[in-house]
Amino acid sequence: MPFTSPVSQEAAGLHTEIQQFYARQMHLLDDGEADAWADTFTEDGTFAANAHPEPARGRETIRTAATAAAAQRAAQGLQVRHWLGMLDVRPQDDGSVRARSYALIINTPAGGQAAVHLSTTCEDVLVRGEDGGWLVSSRQVVRDDLR
Amino acid sequence: MPFTSPVSQEAAGLHTEIQQFYARQMHLLDDGEADAWADTFTEDGTFAANAHPEPARGRETIRTAATAAAAQRAAQGLQVRHWLGMLDVRPQDDGSVRARSYALIINTPAGGQAAVHLSTTCEDVLVRGEDGGWLVSSRQVVRDDLR
Amino acid sequence: MPFTSPVSQEAAGLHTEIQQFYARQMHLLDDGEADAWADTFTEDGTFAANAHPEPARGRETIRTAATAAAAQRAAQGLQVRHWLGMLDVRPQDDGSVRARSYALIINTPAGGQAAVHLSTTCEDVLVRGEDGGWLVSSRQVVRDDLR
């Protein structure tokens, strides 16, 4: 029963650090900063989703897809908010972190009604970059409706 | 004004520990692991809800109810997500913790549209188990629509 | 790339402290404790929103508006829940904190269906009060539908 083990001060700090990372990462995405958002992945980072036939492989491929998606949302006049929650952080022996969370996508059309768009899970492997901060090495998003 | 007192490093660690506990507890519930979920309650744990005439008393009673609910959701092809948030953690003198949070239930039918199902509050008394981790000693869920 | 810098133990404690502050502040608001909620602002605190032509200036002005809003919700039989999430905390050199978060408002009518009411962002400047706790010095709420 992994949840019954106590959490050290160090582990608590790590959990918070990952929360802070996700907050800034999602702000970038929802602010339309596709370029800066892509930089939160490692150079060989992957983004897989059960809604897509193939994973996006490599930061530049992820950047291209994110830039196109941001342009589409802007053209639609849609404000998207990515909420991550129920974050389970598991440090690995090699210094990486496995993070499993729920992600909720809330869409608001200009002048319209905010609503839940999608409910998903998000499984990331996070690694420390050269400056000590976190980067996504691999991401797996699973939409609840396509499960 | 309780919110104006500063939070010690120790209290910050506790708050994070409880968040991590809830993340894993809700993952178990939503993954259909009713058995492992029931083990997050103390042997004499109680689960009360304003939607039910009587509280469920004891881990085995909670287990039976959770197992039946998980089977029902599986039969319906429904993916449920329990989100806890706005967590207020109050350590008690006897070592237990009172935790008050909001809980949102998001339902997604297979191939269908995710939506808010219920908004509730959740008031728990948490105690440390033998191995130092947390267990729910009592839970009170109040649905906002039945308030 | 601010999100790549590592988070010190101190910064992790601060992030948790702010989360705990928001939990209690929103509980007060949603419990209809408009008076205690207004006391979480500084005496010269401001509350600006893109839904309002002018900011509310000063704790007593904020108190008057909050008291009226609470009475209206009670008269409507509406249970409102303010969820803050995706919290980005940035300590400033003067000891204040800039906190940017998403806020979701979930409404449940008595006997009715819970639903997303609004999606917003919330940008606060927080300062420590005399007893060491946090107070809102300025708040800027931006509704996604009016952006």
Image: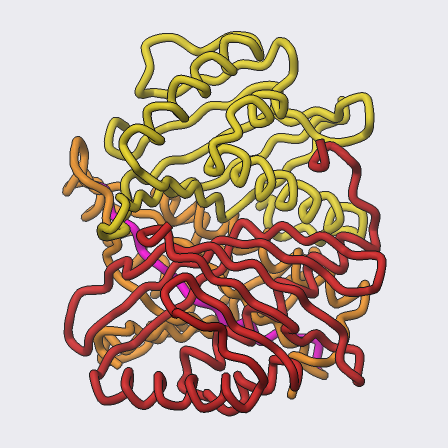
Chain colours: A red, B yellow, C orange
Q: Residue at x 62, y 45 (%)?
A: B19
Q: Position of residue C109 (x, y in %)?
A: 18, 40
Which is more toward the observer, C140 or B71?
B71
Q: Position of residue C79 (x, y in %)?
A: 27, 41
Name the image quarter holding the C terminus of chain B: top left
Q: Position of residue B111 (x, y in %)?
A: 25, 51
Is C132 on the left-hand or right-hand side of A116?
right
Looking at the rendering, the stretch of residues picked out in magenta corresponds to C94-108
**C101 drawn magenta:** yes
Q: Residue at x 77, y 56 (%)?
A: A91
Is B144 on the left-hand or right-hand side of B22?
left
Is C105 above or below relative to B65? Answer: below
Q: Position of residue C76 (x, y in %)?
A: 15, 42
Q: Residue at x 79, y 78 (%)?
A: A132
Is C70 on the left-hand or right-hand side of C28?
left
Q: Is residue B5 visible?
A: yes
Which is more toward the observer, B84 or A58?
A58
**C127 drawn magenta:** no
Is C108 on the left-hand or right-hand side of A142?
left
Is A1 above or below relative to A31? Answer: above
Q: Residue at x 75, y 80 (%)?
A: A129
Which is more toward the observer, A146 or C2?
A146
Is A6 above or below relative to A114? Answer: above
Q: Main secondary structure of the magenta part?
A: strand
Task: Place residue B89 in its image quadrant.
Answer: top right
